[in-house]
Amino acid sequence: MKLLIVDDHPVLREGLVALLKQAGQDIDVLQAGDASEGLALVDDHADLDAILLDLAMPGMDGLRAISEFGRKRPELPVIILSSSEDPRDARKAFALGAVGYVPKSASPHVLLLAIRTVLNGDLYVPPVVLGELPGGAKRQAGRAEQGAVRLTARQIEILAMLSMGQPNKTIAAALGISEKTVKAHITAIFRALNVVNRTQAAAVGREAGLI
């Protein structure tokens, strides 16, 4: 796995590198002190798996950088690692194309979980940002039903498969489509059901009678 950390604080970057390398010996981590340097590294390293990006940086800020990274490498997932725990900042980041949002106050376990979740094709937003409470999936299902959620036949097919724990690669092979197309469908499913991960999507889908 090859990751790129884009943050203007050297001490934080070094701490993240140490954490990631402890988590797995096969992890290669690149560092950039600002968005411009990060964009240059993206050009030079076609084998990157994900980007960890700060929001508040001098020069090009993280929100603008999300769009720039997406323009260069639309398939490369961007995870925001920010000191902000404001849900509005998370929504802005997701609207621009981020697929994960982790507050810097989160534990190392949460960060590693976020990376694994994103690399598995899911969105990741921690409860502290979502403001979720126990039973949130049922409340979301209620909102889904009230909103008369509609999914296409293909999306319902994919929802059923992901509810059984099948990864994107397996779903793509079974349906004869690309993994990128599967990810696009899953993003649309999450948006339609007002959820942020596969577990919630499956729960809401069942509650709404979609699967």
Image (spheres, helix red, strand yellow):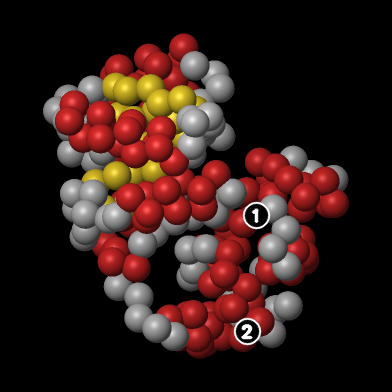
Residue plotted at (83% across, 51% down): 175
Q: Is residue 203 above or below residue 28?
A: below
User: In this image, 55 relative to 197: left or right?
Assistant: left
The residue lying toward the viewer, choosing from 117 and 87, is 117
Under circle 1, the secondary element is helix
Q: Looking at the picture, how far across and down is residue 182, in whole percent?
A: 69, 49
From the image, tell me which residue sits under label 2.
208
**How many neighbours does mark 1 have within 10 angstroms: few (below 14), some (14-19), or many (20 or more)?**
some
Q: Looking at the picture, how far across and down is residue 163, in whole percent?
A: 68, 69
Is residue 84 visible in the rendered image? The answer is: yes
User: In this image, 140 relative to 18: left or right?
Assistant: right
Is residue 155 visible in the rendered image? The answer is: no
Closer to the N terminus: mark 2 or mark 1? 1
Q: In the image, which disc is placed on residue 92?
A: none
Q: Quadrant of the C terminus?
A: bottom right
Residue plotted at (25% across, 29% down): 14
Q: In the image, which disc is placed on residue 185?
A: 1
The residue lying toward the viewer, choosing from 91 and 129, is 129
**How many neighbours does mark 2 have within 10 angstroms: few (below 14), some (14-19), or many (20 or more)?**
many
Residue plotted at (63% across, 84% down): 208
